[in-house]
Image: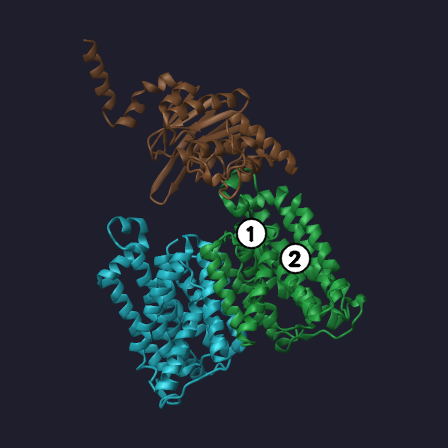
Amino acid sequence: MLDFPILFASFLNGLAQGAVYALVALGLTLIYGVLHIINFAHGALLMAALYGVFFLNARLGVDPYAALPVMAPAMFVLGYCLQRFVVGRAGHGRDENVLLVTLGLAIVLENAALAAFKSDTRTIETAYTFSTVNVAGAMIAVPKAVAFFGALAVAALLLLLVTRTDLGRAIRAVAKERQGARVVGIDVEHVFAMTFGIGLACLGAAACFLLPAYYVNPQVGNGFVLLAFTIVVLGGMGSFAGALAGGLIVGVIESLGGLWLGESLGQIGIFLAFIAILLFRPRGLFGRA
Amino acid sequence: MRELAAITALTIVVALLPAFVTSGFALNLAIMVLYTTLLGQAWNVLAGFGGQFSFGHALFFGTGAYASAALQVHLGVNAWLALPVAIACGAAAGAFVGALSFRYGLRGSYFALVTLAFAEVFRILANSVAFTGGGVGLLLPLKESAANLQFAGKAGFLYLILAFVLAGFLVSWWLKHSRFGAWLAAVRDSEESAAALGVDVFRVKLGAIALSAALMSAGGFFYVQYFHYIDPHIAYGPAVSVEALLGPIAGGLGTVFGPLLGAAMLQLLGELTRNLAGDAPGVSLVVYGVVLIGMVTFLPRGIAGLIARRGA
Amino acid sequence: MLEVRGLSIRFGGVQALDGVSLAVAAGGITALIGPNGAGKSTLFSVVSGFLAPDAGTVHFLGEDVTGVAPHRLCRMGIARTFQIVQPFAAQTVRENIAVGAHLARPSRREALAHAERVAERVGLAQLDKLAANLTVAARKRLELARALATGPKLLLLDEVLAGLNPNEVAAVLPVVRAIRDSGVTVFMIEHVMQAVMNLADTVFVLNEGRLIAGGPPAQIASDARVIEAYLGHGAAERLRRAAEAAHA
């Protein structure tokens, strides 16, 4: 097992998986950074997006990557409406309330999926599901390789959006100083909803990259919630670079850890790391104190 | 004092129930309402009275359940003896999580997250360790007799759960009328002010989480006696954590009767949903989720708050 | 009663307190004044255990209490109010004060009874009103009552008059005096000069983290350094010349 090629392949796989995790975490950290909400429904929303991609493929024969221009905007709209009409209204501005609302949302989504689709695990098969590509001697599944580059591309787009556009400027303003932004005329409620929408759009994209090499069932979100939080907390709440770095690191740790300890025990390492970070260095790698 | 009278009256009514109601279905309903009430009472101690919202209360439930089950199954320990051990283990788990979290100042969402993480860690551990039976879980052998806290009819279980719920009521009442309870409420409403008034915030929070965990582990103990089975997903999975918080939020956080009101309402809703939508898995939980969102949005003080407002 | 020696504390790039030394005599009313940002509340936070200084000591009744936790200091006899009041919003006035009363009284009934007595001393009525529904003036009184209920030897009042109109201020002054008369030493941060001059036996002045003056109120009022701290560099000289010109 200390065989270098296996380690290397595991490392690359971890990197690829990590890039998708990073994309999921980016949405979460963006939502936290701007709205100061910990979105407990993030995993369930990813699950919803995965089902979306699944059915587009199963019923309409749409290739998951081709589904991106449909899924991302659809998730964006969903996110906008959820924030504007549900989360924003219910929060009353109190931390615990928003916590409970996003939890409620997660419960509704997960069980609606359970009721509608039953608990069967579904996968899709495409022409390239089983193809591999040779990367410096290691055989990497094509879907994973595409996921890696795709996720990074989306992250780059997100960065451009936040740094170069007017909307991005507004988002950063609201994130830094909510009241001040209101005073200079920014429609804060609108920015909140846009941010939530963008966060979910990231999930839509992540789902497109994830499904070809993964699967979907109503409970799949649960696994991602803690993972996404771990990444966000590791990288620093509200930090882009942190979410990216954190995602890649966690992906690699999960992959290598799984190699040594088996899949489930490997996950323990991540959660223990999560607890340790929360206790001893809550601002993570790149976060502000 | 009116609260004590109400508690007494309720206890008597429930105790007399088996004399008038023989339907197994009805008794089971009563048991499940009381069981959910117990879980809610436990969560309410830490969240409603203490202001610390835990999303991983299953940790204490599962610890109590496994402690009890393992003792009975592997070591043949009598259930009556396993009970205090289970509660002690649960309280210890509470003290452990509390000592770590509160020592490092975790609050709000961060605290909720850490409790979630702990529950997950234990779930994975329970899945991989021998004495919990791994993924297969533990099956409590059927040995119906009061000496084993297993009962042939439902009445015995009704009394068992009633005893726990009564303890929960008394704890809640005590929190409303004692110095510790006053300190806890102070910590909930403003930690800084409480400290400035001489309250040892850390110790108070620690006491609260240990108490909350003790009650929760009693719930775990009961589950094993009633259903004869426990596995990692039931013990430490998110379902129990959610079940514990739905009642108090619907019924009224930080009140004595909130958990009961909430449990009753949710059970009623569950029955209604089952009648209307059949036995499709997940439908009643969708309803519960909607209720959760609705309550937080429109009735943040729950049913008890509604009653209080009407009375005021 | 209270003695601080060489207290210094730094936050990032700001030296909030720079070698502050002062002594608060027992049984009187001592005031701490100074322009905004001078470090007054920071001093209170250090004295009441909420902040640990980088250097210096705090002695209370002869004992070194530097860095002792707030709740332990409260049990030793130091109580404080906060500039930005934080009442226990979900609880009634009586319940709020009872939290302080519980320090020395385990019995709920006794604590509630004591709370009523303290409320009367301080002039608070409406004991069953929720703290969230109180006016600003009432909240300030509640803050005062809570701290008083702990039975302190030293009471730190952080701008207890801020936000009150002149009538409300005039109503609180006798309350503070009565507290002093009952044997409690009062150390107060205040901006309302009328109150300071009226109440205080001794006044200390902080500016930019340093103690620049200390003494009886009348002396402080004419101290050039104090005038400059408030009105700017050269103000003392200008005022003096203007006064001479007016007399000429």
Badge 2 is on which residue? B214
Q: Is residue B21 above or below residue C243?
A: below
Q: According to the rendering, which colour does chain A have?
A: cyan
Q: Position of residue A190 (x, y in %)?
A: 29, 59
Q: According to the rendering, which colour does chain B have?
A: green
Q: Residues within 10 Å of mark 2 (few under 14, many from 20)?
A: many
For numbered disc 2, what is the local secondary structure? helix
| Residue B297 falls left or right of residue A172 | right
| Residue B81 falls left or right of residue C107 | right
Q: Is residue B182 above or below residue A204?
A: above
Viewer-proximal residue among C4 and A288: A288
Q: In the image, what residue type sits under mark 2?
A: Ala
Badge 1 is on which residue? B304
Which chain is represented by brown in the image?
A: C
Q: Residue at x 42, y 25 (%)?
A: C31
Q: In the image, what residue type sits under mark 1?
A: Ala
Q: Residue at x 52, y 56 (%)?
A: B53
Q: Position of residue B231 (x, y in %)?
A: 63, 73
Tags 1 and 2 in contact by the CB under 8 Å rule? no
Q: Earlier in the sequence, mark 1 or mark 2?
A: 2
Viewer-proximal residue among C13 and A37: A37
